[in-house]
Amino acid sequence: MITPTHVVTNALISRNRRAHGDGLLADPANATWFIVGGFAPDVGLYALTAGAAIFYPLVRDMSLSDTMQYAFDDLFFNNPLWITVQNTLHSPVVLGALALSGKVTERPRLLSFALGCLLHTAMDIPVHHNDGPLVLFPFDWSTRINSPVSYYDADHYGRIVAPIDLAITVIGGAFLLRSWWRNRQA
């Protein structure tokens, strides 16, 4: 899924929990960290991609197109730095440990963040054909769940899933914006 869809989904859940005034996300700080967990897993890949887009054309004289192909066909799957950065906050193993740590040490913000990241991962797994999270990282650097569906690959229903993904973002975002505006006017 596109990163904004994760953020909007986490924000909608957070808003709903806060509206009901119960549970972990009723606290505004916890709700914020849950929303941050919606985008945090993708931040590292954005940074690596931006770095590659600068480094490879300038230092290796590669075109931007060749750089992106190299980044996502090779580095993403084979480079230890890329694998680590991409999978640390996508790994159910790492996130489960973070959530447990937050629960045991009574750090609700850490728990909220870990749960936000876990939701991100749970949403990614079914819509990544062969490039989803490494589900057993850091213990296993190759096992991915290969979904028959992709949110972007036309050969794997991307023409169907991408508009749904975008609709969730646009409609959910509009709802959140409208709610925010109404609360501000009140």
Image (tube, rainbow, N blue to C red):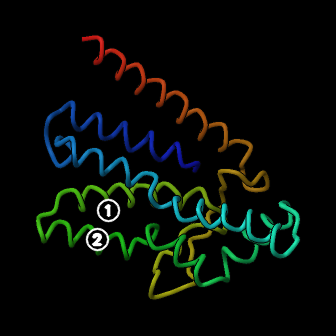
User: Which residue is tagged 2?
Assistant: 98
User: Could you say where residue 23 lies in the image, as x and y percent from the top left?
Assistant: 15, 46
**Residue 173 versus residue 119: which sits nearer the camera?**
173
Q: Quadrant of the C terminus?
A: top left
Look at the numbered disc 2 and give the secondary structure of its residue: helix
Q: Residues within 10 Å of mark 1 (few under 14, many from 20)?
A: many
User: Could you say where residue 11 lies in the image, as x and y percent from the top left?
Assistant: 37, 39
| Left or right position of 28 against 146 | left
Q: Look at 73% across and 55% down and name the residue there.
A: 156
Q: Look at 18% across and 32% down and name the residue there.
A: 20
Q: Earlier in the sequence, mark 2 or mark 1?
A: 2
Look at the numbered disc 1 and give the secondary structure of its residue: helix
User: Which residue is tagged 1?
Assistant: 114
The answer to whether 186 is drawn above or below residue 13 in the figure is: above
The answer to whether 124 is drawn above or below residue 57 in the figure is: above
Name the quadrant containing residue 166. top right
Disc 2 to disc 1: CB gap under 8 Å = yes
